[in-house]
Image: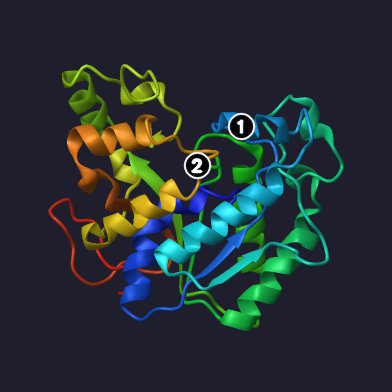
Amino acid sequence: MHAHPDDETINNGATMAKYIAEGAHVTLVTCTRGEEGEILVPHLAHLSSQNLDGLALIREVELANAMKALGVTDHRFLGAPAVKYRDSGMMGTPPNERPDVFWQADLDKAAQYLVDIILEVKPDILITYDEFGGYGHPDHIQAHRVAMRAAELVKDRFDIRKIYWNTMPRSVIQSGIDAMKAQGSDFFGAESADDLPFAKPDELVTSHIDANDYVDKKMAAMAAHPTQIALDGPFFALSNQIGLTVWGHEYYTLVKGEAAGPRDENGWETDLLA
């Protein structure tokens, strides 16, 4: 369950590619089409929400291409075709006040759309954001609220066995920052992981997926989102300077169910399906 196109690849791309290759079924639900996103491709700048407001169609295509790279064949936009939730932009901005944005959506109505998907695909696992939405974006917070509300509404008819929240441990981010600074570069201009709102205390991590065998698929999926992820930006710079393996590791906090199966050297669960 993700807020905008590209969030899925950054957070879970390697995990999705790994489990699909191992025979699992993955359903991706995206809540908005990312209409308020910055446009990093100069010749498409006229499609911004302040101009022609045509970014949604581009990001739909980017998402489809990214899913093809990962092998995901089941992707839905939340509420489609009945409703089309719009990107809410950041807190305190004019787009955030529009009645059609995801942040303004009725919680139970939006959750019911996800309930319908849950009853159809009957997932063993649900993955979404934490209550802060990872870094505070209203659509990420709302995606968390909707996902958790849907799990609550559906539990008498279908019980999801495990629920995870995406997380990024502070130690991993700090290692990346240190390595890039040693190469004369930076990561989002941060001096320390403490400067980045998505850096979480390591003790919140319960689960760690090593999907380095599938990191090329994740990088191809990231490259499929050119309006949002620059090939010379921090994501790819991190890959170029400290290695692709940094993107093959993805981290989670288990909030429902029991961790099981093998553990890594940190004691973190290494198989979400265990």
Q: Which residue is mark 2?
A: 226
Q: Which residue is mark 1?
A: 43
Instruction: State the residue at coordinates (75%, 60%).
Output: 110
Instruction: State the residue at coordinates (22%, 62%).
Output: 213
Q: Nearer the viewer, residue 83 or 194?
A: 83
| Residue 90 visible in the snapshot | yes
Dot placed on the residue nearer the N-terminal end, 2 or 1: 1
Q: State the quadrant of the N terminus.
A: bottom right
Q: Nearer the viewer, residue 79 or 126?
A: 79
Per the image, label 2 sits on a secondary structure element best described as loop
Between label 2 and label 1, give the one nearer the viewer.
1
Residue 168 vertical position relative to residue 217 in the rendered view, above or below:
above
Per the image, label 1 sits on a secondary structure element best described as helix
Kind of residue at badge 1? His
Instruction: State the residue at coordinates (78%, 44%).
Output: 101
Q: Is residue 128 left or right of residue 262?
A: right
Q: Which mark is residue 88?
A: none
Which x, y percent locates residue 204? 35, 45
Q: State the quadrant of the C terminus.
A: bottom left
Q: Is residue 231 left or right of residue 60?
A: left
Colouring rule applied to residues: rainbow
Residue 141 vertical position relative to residue 126 in the rendered view, above or below:
above
Instruction: State the residue at coordinates (82%, 60%).
Output: 83
Q: Nearer the viewer, residue 23 or 274?
A: 23
Kind of residue at badge 2? Pro
Q: Residues within 10 Å of mark 1 (few under 14, many from 20)?
A: few
Which x, y percent locates residue 235? 36, 36
Q: Distance between the Cα atoms at labels 2 and 1?
A: 12 Å
Q: Quadrant of residue 108?
A: bottom right
Residue 255 vertical position relative to residue 72 in the rendered view, above or below:
above
Q: Is residue 54 left or right of residue 1?
A: right
Q: Extreme front residue here?
A: 43
